[in-house]
Amino acid sequence: MNASNPAPLRRFLDSIRTPDLPDLGPEPRTGRMSLEVANRTVTRFAVEAKLTPPTEAVLRSAALLWHDHLDASHEISQNIHSPDGSFLHGIMHRREPDYGNAKYWFQRVGHHACFPECARQVASLLEASAGKEMAGRLLPEGVWDPFAFIDLCEEAAELAPEDSTRRTLQTIQRVEFDALLGHIFLRA
């Protein structure tokens, strides 16, 4: 796969996208793929893109997480001993919700190579939506803070699904997910 070509990333994202965003918690959406369909989709993509088994495992964990199959994603991510695996593991625990465990896994991530992209996109998003206070928490000194994001998700857990803060956090979760996948595809 050509690292300078974003087409494979777009094809993968298009193959797993849903009309609605994943929730911040474990609640499954009606528009998600079944576990079987999600696995078939990843397998087909992996064969067509000639992915290595480690890259396929990371993408499978990500796709299952996107489609609310937290346990199945967890089984994979806990066996990926890299910052990418820890990142997915952390997102899964944040959605579970087990916020302390999510922070543990993000500690294991360290400073991930996709954090600058997260910061750039989140700053742009929050500037457009007048989210200065949220930006101050998530981007101290312009740097993505995954621990602050975990805290905000925990605070939003009691908000109604249609609450604008909760919706903004779901959009930020998509930004985080897309930045991680972009990083994975650059390396593949």
Image (cartoon, helix red, strand yellow):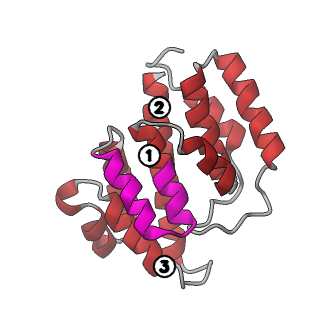
Is residue 48 placed above or below 126 in the rendered structure? above
Say whether disc 3 or disc 1 marks the residue closer to the N-terminus: 1
**Residue assigned mark 1:** 86
Q: Residue at x 42, y 33 (%)?
A: 183
Q: Residue at x 45, y 76 (%)?
A: 154
Q: How many marks?
A: 3
- Quadrant of res 16: top right
Residue stretch rendered in magenta on the structure? 89-110
Asked whether the beta carbons under mark 1 and mark 2 sit within 8 Å of each other, the answer is: no
Is residue 53 placed above or below 129 in the rendered structure? above
Q: Crowding at label 1, few (<14), some or many (≥20) Cα neighbours within 10 Å?
A: many
**Residue assigned mark 2:** 184
Q: Nearer the viewer, residue 58 or 144?
A: 58
Q: Which mark is residue 156?
A: 3
Q: What element does badge 1 sit on?
A: helix
Q: Residue at x 60, y 50 (%)?
A: 74
Relative horizontal placement of residue 101, taking residue 161 as reference (left or right): left
Q: Amino acid at mark 3?
A: Ala
Q: Crowding at label 3, few (<14), some or many (≥20) Cα neighbours within 10 Å?
A: some
Relative horizontal placement of residue 18, taking residue 9 as reference (left or right): right
Is residue 45 visible to the viewer in this orientation of the structure? yes
Instruction: Give the x, y percent position of residue 72.
Output: 68, 49
**Is 97 within the magenta?**
yes
Asked whether the beta carbons under mark 3 and mark 2 sit within 8 Å of each other, the answer is: no
Is residue 90 placed above or below 79 in the rendered structure? below
